Amino acid sequence: MAQQANTFATFNAVGNREELANAIYRISPEETPFVSTIGKDKASSVNPEWQTDALAAAANNKVEQGNQAAVAAVTPTKRVGNRTQISEKTFGVTGTQEEVDKAGRKSEVAYQKAKKMVELKRDIEYAAINNTTAIPAAAGVAPQARGLSGWLATNNSLGATGAAPNPDTNTAPTDGTLRTFTEALLKDVAQKCWEQGGNPTMLFVPGALRATVSGFTGAATKFDKTEDKTLYATVEVYVGDFGRYSIINSRHQRARDVFLIDPKQWDLLTLRGMKSTPLAKTGDAENYMINTEWTLKSKQEAASGAIRDLQPA
């Protein structure tokens, strides 16, 4: 029916108060499973280095009675390193915006600082997984830390024409022909890690391949919420011939890569911790920079592995 004549409605009024909830809602994911899981340590230079070593292959070691020993050559340790990377966020807030009454936060500056720090942490997660080479600082060149994708050289499964990275020569991996992700590929890399002496415990999987992993036979162990008997459809654990792996949904890695990770063999090294610094004031605004300097340390990349060149499901 039509509106009664001469009735006063909300759309006629000019004095109704607005309603704005005193909260701010974000849906953007904040989790950073790789950098949150691995070790943390301090860097003291822009090119931290460390040493790795390996035992000789086991053999049938026997000598004659009264053997006169010949001194064998000693294999030196291997010296490896990475470059630190500077990650930063900036923002500016006018004096007026900081003073007015706001919904959801008391201080705009404080809110933006907290938000930018979360964004920085996500950027570090992305770079620590995806960067393929280390880049030294130079005039006009931003330094870059080699990430997981560029470290994993020993245990790889690759598509046709694909090539593993070589951190010794700072060579990036080469993408190969995409192929279907099968349980056999996962078992192959798991065996390679085990044969090298590694014991990976985490399987990092992009969203595009998560359903594929859930269909694997070894993923029969599902998460059971016992208090209400709800059985979730997503698989939390994969049990294979060479280990038991927690399955981690990884939002920031490429859809074509899956990683088997031993988190004890990786460290996030920090040269400069995350810090907020006021920038020069040039007008009626407060400007800030939040930055950090970090790198990724691979104690022994052969303890982990990569299945690359996978066709998203």
Image (tube, rainbow, N blue to C red):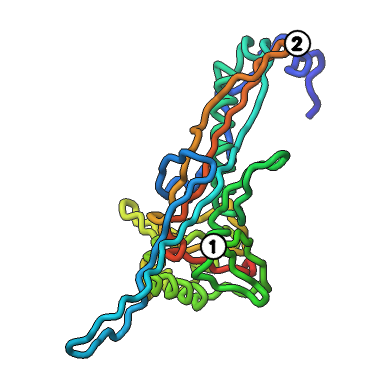
Q: Which amino acid does label 2 sit on?
A: Val
Q: Mark 1 points at which residue?
A: 210
The residue drawn where x is 57% and y is 17% is 107
Q: Which amino acid does label 1 sit on?
A: Arg
Q: Is residue 256 above or below residue 145?
A: below
Circle 2 SS class:
loop
Give the camera-side residue of 149 and 30: 149
The residue drawn where x is 42% and y is 49% is 37
Q: Name the residue under label 2.
A: 14
Q: Where is residue 295 in the image (x, y as percent from the top left)?
A: 52, 45
Q: Where is residue 237 in the image (x, y as percent from the top left)?
A: 40, 63
User: Does 290 sit left or right of 80 as displayed?
Assistant: right
**Considering the image in quadrants, where does the N terminus appear?**
top right
Q: Is residue 43 something one can see in this rendering?
A: yes
Alpha-carbon neighbours of circle 1 within 10 Å: few (<14), some, or many (≥20)? many
Quarter of the rendering containing residue 77: bottom left
Alpha-carbon neighbours of circle 2 within 10 Å: few (<14), some, or many (≥20)? few
Find out whether the residues at labels 1 and 2 contact each other: C-beta distance under 8 Å: no
Q: Which of marks 1 and 2 is in front?
A: 1
User: Does 195 sit left or right of 151 as displayed?
Assistant: left
Q: Is residue 1 above or below residue 284?
A: below
Circle 1 SS class:
helix
**Considering the image in quadrants, where does the C terminus appear?**
bottom right
